Image (cartoon, helix red, strand yellow):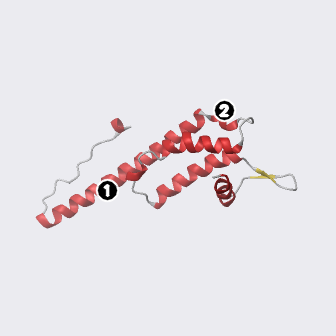
Amino acid sequence: MLQNRRILPLLPNKPHTSSTKAVTLLADIYWLMNRCTEEEIKGRISLGNKAFYANQDLFKSKLLTKNSKLWMYKTLVRPVVTYACETWVLKENIKTKLRVFERKVLSRIYGPTKEKDGTWRIKSNEELNRLVIKTS
C-alpha cells in the first residue's frame, strides 16, 4: 500500500518570509497527513471487505448463531479495519464511511426482519445498534 503513494513536496517553490514559512509548513504537513489518513482509511475499509468476504461461508452459515457471527466480526474483521486507528484524524465523511461499513456487515449478520403481514424489510440503524448492545 505504501508503494503506491507519491511523495509530495511539502513546500511549493515560492519565496517565504520567516514568519509565514512555519505556518505554511504546518499547513502543508496537516494537509498531507489528512490526505494520507483518508487514503489509509479507504484502504482499511477495502481490507475489511476482503476479510469479511473471505469468511463469507461462515457468515452465511445456518449452523452458527448470530452471536457467534458477531463475535467473528469483532475478532476477524473489525481489527483489520481499525488497525492503527489511534493515529487517524477523523472527519465526518470518514466517520460516515466507517459507520456504513459496519452497518453493512451487521445487516448481513442479522439479516432482514419478517413483518406480521409476511413482507420482509431491512433492519434500521437503531435496531442494529440495539441488537449489538444487547448481545455485548
Please indicate whether residue 68 sits to the left or right of residue 22 in the image.
right
Q: Amino acid at mark 1?
A: Trp
| Amino acid on which disc 2 is placed | Asp
The numbered mark, 2 or 1, whose residue comes first in the sequence reads: 1
Res 75 → quadrant: top right
Name the residue located 72 percent from the left edge and 47 percent from the top edge.
111
Would residue 62 be found to the left or right of residue 28 on screen?
Answer: right
In depth, the one of 70 and 125 nearer the eye is 70
Quarter holding residue 49: top right
Dot in front, 2 or 1: 2
Q: Residue at point 38% right, 50% down?
A: 37
Residue at image location 83% in from the left, 52% down from the top: 119
Q: How many residues crowd around disc 2 within 10 Å: few (fewer than 14), some, or many (20 or more)?
A: few
Q: Residues within 10 Å of mark 1 (few under 14, many from 20)?
A: few
17 versus 6 height, above or below: below
Circle 2 is placed at which residue position? 57
Question: Is 56 displayed left or right of 4 in the figure?
Answer: right
List the single residue furthest toward the front.
136
* Disc on res. 2: none
- Reading the image, the residue beneath label 1 is 31
**In the rendering, at what x and y percent does residue 133 appear?**
64, 56
Tally of marks: 2
Q: Secondary structure at mark 1?
A: helix
Depth check: 134 or 54 in front? 134
Nearest the camera: 133 or 56?
133
x and y percent of residue 3 in the render? 34, 35
Name the image quarter holding the N terminus: top left
